[in-house]
Image (cartoon, rainbow, N blue to C red):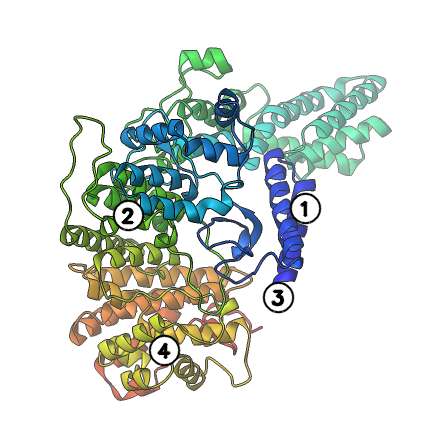
Amino acid sequence: MTFPYAMGQLARALATAEHHPDLATRERAALRSEGWFKHLQRSALGLIRTGDRAPLARTPVWVTPDVLRGGFVSGDAAAQLPLDERELAVLSEASLPATRSAMNGWWLSESGMQVLVRLLGTGHYRLEHPEEGAFLAVAALLEDGDADAAWAILRELGPWMDRLRFSPREARDAQPLTGQTQRYTAAQTAQRLAHKRPQAQVEAQREAHGVWAPWEDRLVAFFEAWRNMPAEEVRASAAVLVAEYERLALLHTLSRKHLRPGSTLARLNAAVASLASAGELTPREHGLLDATLRRAADKRGALGSPEREALRARQRADVRAPSHAAVAAVVATRVSAAPPDRGLPDGHGLDGPLTGKEQERTGLPEGTPVPEAARSILGQGLRAGVDELLARGVVPSAEALAELAPDLVAEHLARTHPDPALGRLLALIYLTFRKRRTLLLLNLQAQVRFEELPWVGPLSPEGEPGSRPSHTPSGAGRAGTATAGPGQASALAVARRLGGLGVQWFPGTLQPNPLTSELRYLLGLAGSQVVLPEELAADIFMGSFSPRFEQAAARGARALGGSLYGRYYRLDYLAAERHKLAALCTRRARELGNLTADANGTAANGAVIEQAQVLSTHHLLPLLELGALEGMDFAGIARRALSTARAALRLALEQDRPLGRIKDAAYAWRNMVFFLAQLSDREAHAWVRLAAEAEGGRPEERVLAGLLRELDLVAQGGVGAQGVRAFYGWSTVPHPQLARLRKAAGVQPR
């Protein structure tokens, strides 16, 4: 299974590296192709174990692998880096060979340890990979007098001293850990602005105004004079125009209006070509020409008229205006002056009109406004609290929220650690660890945990053998030794806040696994017993569930069995507690008609997994029990989940492969039913009845109105509720809701 996938990825990367018009894209594709070639080569040699949490042979799990698309690995380690210029200078000054082992040895010398202790105190360092915090941890432990813990770390690192970088990178300042975050750093924002390409449609319009509009006027002027010209002059002038047109058409290929049959330009060009070849026009050509000239005059005004002159003046102004891409490049230069590894402050002033100095440097007119597309990119680089970023629309999805979550966790680690310097180090190691891409894992294996890094445990407050001396610069003060209680309470508060934000802002989507990982880590710090199951991939599902899923499903079925949610999805808590989850989910999927007896493959796996998600409610019941949903307007977020389902069904009608959108709609619908289950049956009945009445006449709205009426039967507990078939996303038979949707749209079944 893995070999064809890897070969396909290699082929695509090679094709992009050879044929893509953008140089940077070709270079990135070349690197990808090199990674896939290494994967195939090393897999054949038995050096890679695809699907294992330790995918590199004879390599411990804490070594960060170079991860390719789909969770495959190239076989390299991410921290297996060449020496940089600063390292080469240090080695030269110390008269040491230019090798990684020599560099690592220097850091463990007296001189290197002094630098490490200084960096710990000032915080003036950066980490790109978790391994780069290892020597800082060793230095801290030795300073604290915990030589045993330091030597234990070094024994783990020993076999990798000649390959991996374990040292930090010096920086001008300390990286802020204030709870603020950003989607894109200043460096990334500048890169996005600099790489902005002119929009083809806009550039075609500029070409139409700058090239073909003047050409049309030139042809109109010729035809206004040609009847009074001698025949020889007509033919010669027409030939010159034909040659000029051919030159223009060869040079300017963005706009196609001159090639559109029946257009003014096409007919004028055809008439000129006839005059150049025959010296005269046929009666039919005369008629077409006269009609074309009248139509052009009616639409744009006669040649030389105020209307036509005003139109051409506006078009010339459009052509003279700089392209959005050119202005974005100027803004990119502005942004490049900001600290590269953090976001842009609010009120940064980078979106103001172009200045006189910028005009001198670029030739673009002073006062040119920054286009909305560039302002949007700047907005996405804003550094602020997560709540503000969400309110401003900078965070468009739960997946984007998950990308920001590590900053909140890191801020908690830094704030609650009794030693500020060690708290900072632990937080920065955590941030780099969370950048580690997930592996393709089989047989219910778990991703590598943060605590499995050998240098993390000794840094945590729980791992301290005693009170540690402070590494904070003199006079900066030291936090008192924190007890477990406040740290646990803080971790629980961050988990509640983070989980609540995901539901509040994205109530119609499944919680993505990266966000689940952050919440699990926080709950572990808090000592919470709340169980959060992850989303399982249907294409690699092995037919069984982890104990975590078994617990969550049993808890969900018991807690919600009598609720609207439980009645709609027909939950049986006794069955959930007495049967293996995989067998129960398979049986349920078959009884509901979503899974045929002989089905297998991704769709069959998805139908089974979906039943487990229904039983466990995925993330919703755990977050409710955690208190993350406390005080929420369940009627309001149910309405937004319904809106998500409606949008997904609309997309299903527009796409060639609609089943993915049908699944999205079913997930949003399930969340909606859960939120309604938090209301009383009377409140839920009123909500559903009003929602059904509010749906309009579009196909997706008619389908939802029918589903809502069926849900209302369950809410009322009517006799017809027994025949209600719940809305599911996965099916190994033709999907009933897709058929319903197409029928409502008048689309013939396929």
Look at label 3 and name its amino acid: Met
Q: Which residue is mark 2?
A: 409
Picture coordinates of residue 430, whole percent (x, y): 34, 46
Could you tell me how far apart the alpha carbons at marks 2 and 1 are, in whole angstroms? Answer: 39 Å
Q: Which residue is mark 4?
A: 726
Under circle 4, the secondary element is: loop
Q: Which residue is mark 1?
A: 14
Give the label, 1 or 4, closer to the camera. 1
Indicate the quadrant containing the N terminus: top left, top right, bottom left or bottom right: bottom right
Mark 4 vs 3, N-terminal side: 3
Mark 1 vs 4, N-terminal side: 1
Question: Badge 1, how many Cα within 10 Å: few under 14, some, many 20+?
Answer: some
Could you tell me how far apart the alpha carbons at marks 1 and 3 are, in whole angstroms? Answer: 21 Å
730 left or right, relative to 573? right
537 left or right, relative to 388? right
Picture coordinates of residue 550, whole percent (x, y): 34, 75
Mark 1 vs 3, N-terminal side: 3
